[in-house]
Image (tube, helix red, strand yellow):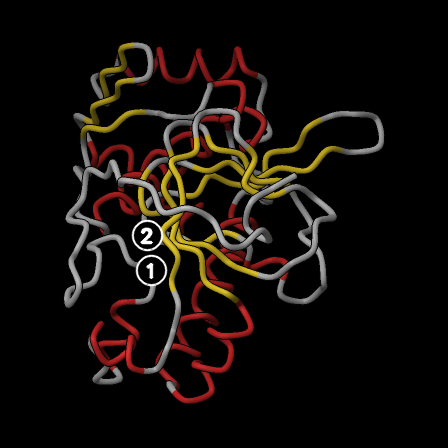
Amino acid sequence: MGVLSNVPFPRQSPQTLADDGDSLRFCSTCAFSQACMDEGMDKGALMDLHVLVEHIGPFHAGDHLFREGEPFEAIAAVRAGTVKTYVVDRDGHEHVLGFHLPGEVIGLNAIDGETYPCNAVALDTVMLCRFSFPKIAVLATRLPGLQRQLFRLLSRDIGRAALLAGDWSADQRMAAFLVGLSRRLAARGFSATRFQLTMARTDIANYLRLAPETVSRVLRRFQEEGRLVVDRRELELLDTAALEALAAPVLRA
């Protein structure tokens, strides 16, 4: 049983690396803060509108946030940690759909139906902001900027999935994954060049549709070529220009 459809949920002490905000300021990883500020709405004004945002967690590695088929009632923004979404086919094989970082939203692909179409599991210690979808949908009708942000988030998820559907080489796929990860972390105030791969290499390989040994081989070659340094899950990008050039056909940038 997941937790996004279960309310109330006790508030826990956050363990975040980013600025957690306060009663007036948004968390620095808030997925909706810019849209609300664009509409002239600060955090205090949103409280006046009775928009309830629940801070839930911590969840630990292996804890499921929701499972495929559970009733859809809420979306959630990741405040800290990494969330993996995946499905399991009829033969019992897992297919990784994506990895969600601080400031990103999970549950958006359930909007069209009444149940979650995939599973979401914590890869490390995860904190979430839970948004009742009926309430945020009502608010979106009053704040066009928030509505546009929801559409952008949906479009971004679709775009990420489509990027890896092409006939790209293993080097291009891995470079695109690393550059995309770097850009997403940088957008939320984290280091763009030094970060931890919180996902297992088997999960990365599954997501990129590569063999695990291919992922290890490509990372090893990138290190030998001076493009990065990797020590277990700790990674530092050294030659970002070379990686971005390799990833450009995939990322279209």
Residue 92 x %, y %: 78, 25
The crowd level at tag 2 (other Cα within 10 Å; few <14, some 14-19, many 20+) is many
Q: Earlier in the sequence, mark 2 or mark 1?
A: 1
Seen from the viewer's position, the closer of residues 59 and 116 is: 59
Give the CA distance from mark 2 to mark 1.
Answer: 5 Å
Residue 243 placement: quadrant: top left
Mark 2 secondary-structure assignment? loop
**Residue at position x 73%, y 33% from top?**
88
Residue 16 placement: quadrant: top left
Tag 2 residue: 103
40 relative position to 64: left or right: left
User: Do the residues under discs 2 and 1 have CB atoms within 8 angstroms?
Assistant: yes
Mark 1 secondary-structure assignment? loop
**Residue at position x 48%, y 72% from top?**
151
Q: Is residue 68 above or below residue 220?
A: below
Residue 76 x %, y %: 46, 54
Which quadrant of the rendered structure holds the N terminus? Answer: top right
